């Protein structure tokens, strides 16, 4: 599981092994706490740009960051905060972008839903469902023309999978023997509609197989498993010049119950975007004591007390970072 | 030489020495090669020519992906109507890409289906409409001179643009005119000088303007001939200066659009010139547009000649 890539991290440390267990855990906590800090500012009304928080999506973002190599390209969608935070390893430039400050990641040119960061391999981000799939295919073709040995990773949600460009992108990548990974973050929701409420069931594995492509379903929320698996398919994809469709089952945390009067009761409100009213910044940032929360899953690998100490240090650093 | 042979020769000439280029599109190196437009494409080693799948929306996105990665791209498209499937990228993707000021080139070369009889779904011929939706630079090509200037300077150049080729002109003899002026961005061309009238041609109407110029000359009315090849607004002071001098402006626009670029010229002309005649020749808004019908631009040359003769004499 050892992964030798080195980065300058939020602590100013460099040349450390990012996939060592503690480092991975620190990145997970950093993503969670960073989003919680942003959420607190959001609740206060600090941001004008619409932000789609990705609480509960941390495992796939940290894993992707851990396996990415310099020649790889990441292509994102409107819910991109987790990948941006994972790659930049800093909080202030992200917040500055949301505040539309000149010091922001994109100098206030992109805001949240289109936020990319080419210096860190995030080459394009689209807020239009399915739009990034074909741009990603072009980026993959460019690597072939330039004879670069990198991988193109396109991240979408289960909603974008319903667009025709999902099918068209796979077709183009396969026809031109281009290595790529499609990450489908499947939280079963498209805004306020569950999959079964809006469409028929799609067997993504069979769909991928019909193109002769690889498929995997990740549902453990275990960042260490994800790193191991993604590293493996990154190599396979490049070697075989093919595409893997990776369906990542996850829960976007931050839902709340809306009290209704007629009939009396409560209605489940899925978190989609904006501030998450029920989420508060806490030093030990578990949101759900369940497998739906990837921070909870960290306890399978690392002692809880150790994680709490680490979390406390990360939070202290982040607070200093944004002072 | 036919119009399309000239366009094809210029395309081949202007891609031959380009590094890092992907030419792509449906049937661009198979069958008729888009009625000869992309026949015999040859690129440098390392560059590619790809006959693609039928996915116009994705193909536009792929062009932007190539461009963002520093690879030059040309998407050859059989019909401008098909490009409507790619509007998402032309508007939304381009709005992001343009902020990066990419050094690579992405050009869509689309055939404007203005030859008629193709049916309801081939009625879209207004090139400026598709450009104006996201302020995309776009250029029409109607004759030898503008084809040479536009394809040489725009086919592969940093940034994104669309180039429109007229299907109506494909098999016609190439119009050879001597260019006397074009602005620095090849948006407006002047071909002739005349002291009596100013003819301004929009969209693909230059052949009609040329015919009018000849008929006027036969009646001893000498007209300047301009073609506006790009989406407006543009700097057309040269055209307006000419209209100020002749005091007679004839505007031809063969596009089927409710919001035509030529209306902007007319407004500018009324505001800045003291005209004796301002004649607008445009298509009548008609349900016929949506049926298999001739796309010929019906112009009453006699009427124009009569109107200008009255003032002239």
Image (cartoon, coloured by chain):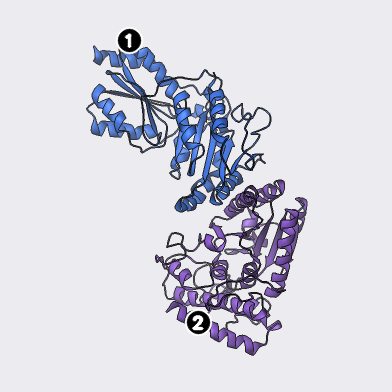
Chain colours: A purple, B blue
Q: Nearer the viewer, residue A43 or A264?
A: A43
The residue depicted at 59 percent of the width and 88 percent of the height is A309
Q: Position of residue A282 (x, y in %)?
A: 53, 84
CA–CA distance between discs 2 and 1? 86 Å
- The kind of secondary structure element at disc 2 is helix
Q: Which residue is mark 2?
A: A317
Residue A297 appears in which quarter of the rendering? bottom right
Q: Which residue is mark 1?
A: B219
Q: Relative to residue B12, is residue A149 drawn left or right?
A: right
Q: Relative to residue A245, is residue A12 drawn left or right?
A: left
Q: Position of residue A301 (x, y in %)?
A: 70, 82
Q: Is residue B253 visible?
A: yes
Q: Position of residue B192 (x, y in %)?
A: 35, 20
Q: Nearer the viewer, residue B5 or A267?
A: B5
User: In the rendered view, would you say A35 is above or below B236?
Assistant: below
Q: Nearer the viewer, residue B282 or A316?
A: A316
User: In the rendered view, would you say A224 is above or below B247?
Assistant: below
Q: Residues within 10 Å of mark 1 (few under 14, many from 20)?
A: few
The chain ID associated with circle 1 is: B
Q: Nearer the viewer, residue B145 or A260?
A: B145
Residue B171 appears in which quarter of the rendering? top right
Q: Relative to residue A202, is residue B78 drawn left or right?
A: left
């Amino acid at each position: 599981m050892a992964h030798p890539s080195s980065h300058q991290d939020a602590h100013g440390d460099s040349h450390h092994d990012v996939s060592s267990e503690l480092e991975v855990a620190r990145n997970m906590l950093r993503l969670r706490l960073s989003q919680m800090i942003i959420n607190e500012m959001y609740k206060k009304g600090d941001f004008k740009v619409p932000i789609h928080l990705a609480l509960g999506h941390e495992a796939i973002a940290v894993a992707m960051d851990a396996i990415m190599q310099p020649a790889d390209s990441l292509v994102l969608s409107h819910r991109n905060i987790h990948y941006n935070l994972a790659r930049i390893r800093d909080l202030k430039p992200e917040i500055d972008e949301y505040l539309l400050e000149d010091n922001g990641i994109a100098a206030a040119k992109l805001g949240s839903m289109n936020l990319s960061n080419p210096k860190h391999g995030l080459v394009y981000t689209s807020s239009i469902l399915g739009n990034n799939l074909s741009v990603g295919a072009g980026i993959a073709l460019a690597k072939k023309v330039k004879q670069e040995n990198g991988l193109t990773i396109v991240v979408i949600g289960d909603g974008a999978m319903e667009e025709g460009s999902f099918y068209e992108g796979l077709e183009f990548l396969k026809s031109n023997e281009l290595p790529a990974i499609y990450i489908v973050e499947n939280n079963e929701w498209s805004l306020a509609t569950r999959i079964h409420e809006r469409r028929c069931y799609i067997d993504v594995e069979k769909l991928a197989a019909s193109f002769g492509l690889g498929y995997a379903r990740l549902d453990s929320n275990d960042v260490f498993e994800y790193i191991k698996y993604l590293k493996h398919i990154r190599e396979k994809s490049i070697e075989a010049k093919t595409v893997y469709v990776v369906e990542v089952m996850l829960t976007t945390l931050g839902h709340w119950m809306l009290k209704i009067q007629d009939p009396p009761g409560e209605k489940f409100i899925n978190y989609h975007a904006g501030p998450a009213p029920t989420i508060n910044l806490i030093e030990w940032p578990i949101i759900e004591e369940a497998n739906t929360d990837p921070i909870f899953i960290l306890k399978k690998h690392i002692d809880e007390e150790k994680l709490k100490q680490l979390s406390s240090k990360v939070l202290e650093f982040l607070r200093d970072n944004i002072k | 030489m036919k119009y399309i042979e000239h366009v094809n020769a210029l395309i081949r000439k202007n891609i031959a020495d380009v590094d890092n280029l992907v030419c792509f599109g449906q049937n661009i190196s198979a069958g008729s090669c888009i009625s000869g437009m992309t026949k015999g494409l040859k690129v440098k080693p390392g560059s590619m020519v790809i006959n693609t799948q039928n996915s116009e929306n994705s193909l536009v996105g792929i062009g932007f992906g190539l461009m963002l990665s520093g690879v030059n791209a040309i998407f050859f498209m059989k019909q401008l109507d098909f490009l409507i499937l790619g509007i998402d990228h032309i508007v939304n993707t381009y709005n992001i890409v343009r902020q990066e000021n990419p050094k690579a080139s992405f050009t869509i070369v689309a055939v404007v289906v203005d030859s008629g009889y193709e049916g309801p779904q081939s009625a879209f011929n207004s090139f400026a409409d598709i450009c104006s939706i996201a302020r995309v630079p776009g250029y029409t090509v109607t004759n030898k001179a503008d084809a040479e200037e536009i394809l040489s300077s725009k086919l592969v150049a940093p940034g994104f643009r669309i180039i429109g080729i007229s299907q109506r002109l494909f098999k016609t003899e190439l119009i050879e005119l001597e260019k006397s002026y074009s602005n620095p961005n090849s948006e407006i061309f002047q071909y002739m000088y005349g002291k009596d009238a100013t003819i301004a041609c929009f969209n693909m109407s230059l052949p009609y303007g040329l015919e009018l110029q000849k008929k006027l000359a036969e009646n001893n009315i000498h007209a300047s001939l301009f073609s506006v090849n790009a989406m407006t607004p543009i700097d057309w002071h040269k055209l307006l200066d000419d209209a100020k001098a002749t005091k007679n402006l004839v505007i031809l626009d063969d596009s089927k659009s409710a919001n035509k670029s030529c209306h902007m010229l007319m407004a500018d002309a009324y505001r800045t010139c003291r005209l004796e005649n301002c004649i607008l020749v445009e298509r009548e808004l008609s349900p016929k547009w949506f049926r298999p019908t001739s796309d010929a631009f019906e112009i009453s040359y006699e009427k124009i000649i009569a109107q200008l003769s009255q003032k002239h004499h």
